[in-house]
Structures are given as structure tokens and as C-alpha cells.
Image (cartoon, helix red, strand yellow):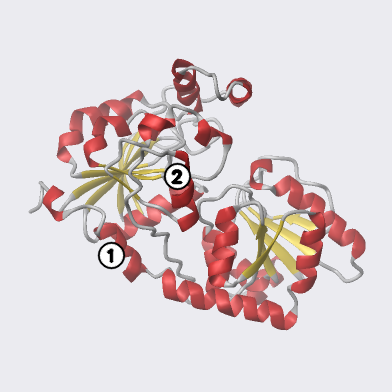
Amino acid sequence: MPKVAFVVQRCGLEVNGGAESLCLQIAQRMSQYWDLEILTTCALDYMTWQNYYSPGVSDVLGVKVRRFPVAKPRDIASFNRLSDNIYSRLKTVSLKEQEAWMQAQGPWSPDLINYVKAYQAEYDAFIFFTYLYATTYFILPWVAQKAYLAPLAHNEWTLYLSMWDRLFEKPRGFIFNTPEERDLIQARFFNAKCEGPIVGVAVEPPDVYSAAAFRHNYKIDEPFLLYIGRIDPSKGCEELFGYFMELRSQETKPRKLVLLGKPAMPIPQHPDILALGFVDEQTKWDAIAACDIVVMPSPYESLSLVLLEAWAVGKPVLVNGRCDVLVGQCRRAQGGLWYTNKDEFLVAIGMIQNSVSYQLGLQGQRFVQSHYVWSKIDCDYLSIIPKDDCYNEN
């Protein structure tokens, strides 16, 4: 049985992040086939990387997780100033400055780096989830000959730092979430061998979910738009709030915007905006079943699990048209519309009504049931590591 390490910046039931959730879900599945463990840090909060979990080995949903302490928490104000400085000199900034920025980006865990250096021979493969953090940048080069990278990349300014040119040439293979992500990486890194499957992740709604229970528990009678994820300007939430408040100023019938997730920005005090915070999985699925439209305003995504979850229960979606990945998902699924400005947002909301809403949701559901099932995804991951590479088989 191959011994495989997944490397990711955080891991835990309390962690609410796309890359981290993807890593844990895939780990749960592939533990059937591989002697697998997740190598990560003790951090919970992605802003500060403050140590939260105990170092050492623990079990998370049946997956072996080995955590290492973060040596230095991140001062977000100082880091933001550093990022502004780097961004303003993107084409001229030195490699030394970029690597200093990456160390500040974190999470910086010398113990994790030293562990991989010392024990790399015990593993047949390392799969790194997301390119953007120190856990990938400073570790992948040490194990490049048996490293696979799931970049989870989108068209953001950090991708154009020159330090990535060398890193993206090193992995033995890649794992992409969407065709758009693969095309972006191919266009950005001419010398990278962008070989590897387009995989994604399966979605499995619970056996029972209840729109009525969600509406009853939160006393919501009106139609509502639903946003799931970190409430952050970088996720398009500030723009969403402005567009929604403009929508409400023009509507006579009632409507709410319901937010599920941890806020990283002020939320407008508006009677029709309800922020419910971080909720458990059952509540999330109940909310999706109860909503009219799932909105995804982020301009930067490599794959939206939220869209797949919405389609899994037959709900239409509305996404930011400036994100090629989200538009691509909607086109392939024929399960949603997109907008690039306020007027298009308002028109799209008006279009997604009654039979149109039902048809979009139904088409999205068929798409998910055909393409995002575990049997297919298991096979895609099993194809990544050649059998001849499995030195530790027993």
C-alpha cells in the first residue's frame, strides 16, 4: 500500500476553508487505498496562524493528521503593508524580498519543514494542496521528485510573482479542479509540465435535509438569496452587499440575503441581511434546500464546492461573471447565470424565477450526478501515483 502525505496549511473540523476542506474530503476517501496522513500546522485562524491545536498525531474523521506548531503568528496589519509594497513593485521585486513575503504569509513552521526533510524517504508521494502558502513553497522543493501539486490557483496578483516560476517547474504532476484552472497555469508558466487530471470533488447531501426546519429555526418566511463562505471583501462580499441593497430599494415584495460563514469585514446593518455565522453541516444543507438562489460573488475561485452543493439539491446559482472558473462551471452545468455589474445582477435576479429557477436547478443536479461522484474521483486520484513508484507496498 503506498504511503502518501497530504500537505496543507490547516486541518481540523473547525477549519472553514476551501483548500482545507477539499484536502480532508479527499483524504477520507483515499485512506481506503493508501497509507495516508495529513501533514499540517497547529493553526486554526488563517489570519494570524495562531497555534490552536495540540502538536502531534490525532484522528480527524478517520484520517491521521500530524500537526506541527507555527513558530511565529502573523501580524496581519504588518503583512498587509508588506503585501502592498510587493504588489506596487511586482515586476521588479527581488527573489529575496518575495521569499521574505512568503515567510510572512506563512504559516511558518520550521518543525514541519524539518520533519519532511528528515522523513521524506518514508513516503512514496506528497500531494500539496494550494500553491499560495509557506507550507508548499518551502517544502515542495525538498520532495519534488515525488511531489504532486493541486494549485487551487486563480487569476490573482500573487500568481505573477516570479518566485513561482521555479516552483511550478518542480512537481512531478498536477491535480486541477477545472479546465479553466489548468489553462490559467499553462498560460502563466510556459515551462511547467501541466500533466495531471482534472478532478474536483464529489458532493453528497445528507439523507435528510429540511427547508422547513431551517425557516422555522431562523424565523425566515421570505424568499432569500444564500451566501456560504468567508465574509470578506476579497470574496466579493462588499460588492454583493451593495448590489443587494440596491435590489431591495427597487423591490416591493420581501426578500432576504442570508449569510453563512465567519465574517472578516463589517456587515451592513440592514433589515434584510441576516448573518448567521458559522453553522454545522446539517444546517448548511437545510439552508440550501430553503433558499431560492445561491449566490457566489467571488472573483477568484479554482472550484466552487458551494455551487456543486447547490446543484446537488436542485438549486440555481448566480455567480460573479469576472471569474472564469465560476462561469465555466455554470456553462457546463447549465445551472446558473452570472453578472459583471450591478445592472446585470438585478436583471439576473429577475430572470431566475419559477420555471426558469426549477430548470436551472434540475440541469445543475444532473450535471453533478454525472461528473462529481466518488467512483470517478477515486479512480482519478489512484491514477496519479504510478504503481512503480510505490516502494513501500506490503
Mark 1–mark 2 Cα distance, whole angstroms, equals: 23 Å
* Residue 108 x/y as whole percent: 42, 26
Q: Residue at x 23, y 44 (%)?
A: 125
In the shown orientation, is residue 170 left or right of residue 199?
Answer: left
Counting other residues with Cα less than 10 Å from the Cα at mark 1, is it few (<14), some (14-19), or many (20 or more)?
few
- Quarter of the figure with residue 304: bottom right
Q: Count all numbered tags in the image, as a single digit.
A: 2
* Disc 1 target residue: 379
Q: Do the residues bearing badges 1 and 2 touch, measured as CB atoms within 8 Å?
A: no
Q: Is residue 216 above or below residue 110?
A: below
- Type of amino acid under label 1: Cys
- Type of amino acid under label 2: Ile
Q: Nearer the viewer, residue 152 or 44?
A: 152
* Disc 2 target residue: 185
Circle 2: element type? helix
Question: Which mark is first along the chain, 2 or 1?
Answer: 2
In the shown orientation, is residue 177 left or right of residue 376?
Answer: right
* Residue 363 x/y as whole percent: 57, 78
Q: Is residue 78 above or below residue 227?
A: above
Tell me the quadrant of the picture where the C terminus can be found: bottom left
